[in-house]
Image (tube, helix red, strand yellow):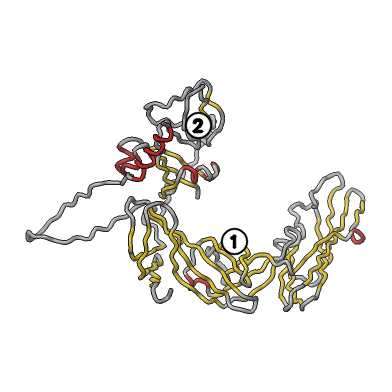
Amino acid sequence: LEKLREQIEEEQKKNTKATGKLILQLNCAIAGKYDFTISYISQNAYWTPFYDLRTESITAPLKLIYRAKIFQTTGLDWKQVKLSLSTATPIQNSNAPLFNTWFLSYINPVNYYNNALLQGKVAGLSIKSSNLNEVVVVGYGADKENETTDIKIRGAATTNATQPLYIVNGNEMSQSEYSKISPDAIKNVSVLKGDAATSLYGSRASAGTILITLKDGLDDYITVSDKQLDVTFDIDLPYDVPTNGKAQTALLKEYDVPATYQFYAVPKLDKEVFLLAKIADWEKLNLLPGEANIIFEGTYIGKSFIDPSSTQDTLNLTMGKDKRVVIKREKLMDFSSVKFLGANKKQVFTYESTVKNNKKEAITILIKDQYPLSQNKEIEVELLESNGATINAETGVLNWKVTLAPGESKKLRMSYSVKYPKDKLLNLN
């Protein structure tokens, strides 16, 4: 019986269609039959960008393939439709922010209530699989013998067999996807029940709606319109996008981008050497934040992330790690020392980084290191040796730009001293 019940519920889900009614008020000068085109905004369709970054060598141009993942759960399958993808978000608040008057006043102590989600057992809670109204709980229901429950814990749960509809930042999401969201990323959770839910989201919200707000995507067929406030990609190819919430991929643009390549290492923080692709005039590419697949020399390297919110003239893209360029940083004990000078203690630290190019071609690598800075007049820091590095005195960062021939290695040394009261402790690691 249980298996039959599950099959019936599965078939009911397949046959459930969102329905609604559109009422128009028209003012016609002449009576007659007219054709209308209806346009509307749905919160249940969206797209996200993602990219492929391909290059065959550090002397070849970078091929940037711009793609879109399209999702929709509007209740209607889109068949052979021509898509127009915009970077605008009409559902978001479009009003420019304004200040309200800021009045200062004393704070009265109050008990702080943290409404973050909790986990635990609710003592004495008995759950039965009967016709109960939706209940929102925080915790775990303790089942009694031979009684079942499908309570879900993440700020909202239901004892009905039908799951509530999850809407995260205006986008529909499955319960399993929602459960992967960190509680720290959730700003607000609210629940709509009854008519309040179905009037907005149709019959699929009959079990209620959980609204989650999180804290603060082919030149011949694609037309890119760079407008004043947004960019639109008009795709002159028909696509099928079923209303199942699964991603459908569309190709937007392909660019052969002139790029300069540079290896990059911070051996104090990471023993690996990274390859960066540096792109000038990147604003013309109309990039959006998104994940990127890295394919180097025909091999999939991994994933990176493109963040175009940079204010720099050059966009740096991480192309992965190169095992054929190695770097090692070590402390030179023979050139490090500790001395006591009256009431003070003086320590000297010397570090040496060795980098080697095991590739068949010459490379340029940017190597960074760091020395500490003092904010206390009792602590004196002096940079003793920098081995020709470019020094940023405000951050304490040293930069070496080194060119290495195939098989060549080079050593870079940095030394500094720290003088401070001997009865104090400092973290000098």
Q: Residue at x 45, y 40 (%)?
A: 189
Mark 2 burial class by Cα count in 10 Å: few <14, some 14-19, many 20+: some
Check disc 1 and give the amino acid type. Lys
Depth check, front residue: 418 or 254: 254
Where's residue 132, x and y in %?
Answer: 38, 27
Q: Residue at x 35, y 67 (%)?
A: 238
Q: Residue at x 39, y 67 (%)?
A: 232
Q: Quadrant of residue 359?
A: bottom right
Where's residue 47, x and y in %?
Answer: 43, 59
The residue beneath circle 2 is: 138
Where's residue 352, x and y in %?
Answer: 83, 64
Question: Can the viewer see residue 59?
Answer: yes
The residue beneath circle 1 is: 303
Where's residue 284, x and y in %?
Answer: 48, 73
Please give left or right for residue 315 compared with residue 86 in the image.
Answer: right
Please give left or right for residue 202 compared with residue 99 in the image.
Answer: left
User: Which quarter shows the N terminus?
Assistant: top left
Check disc 2 and give the amino acid type. Val
351 above or below 358? above
- Mark-to-mark CA distance, 2 and 1: 36 Å
Depth check, front residue: 239 or 114: 239
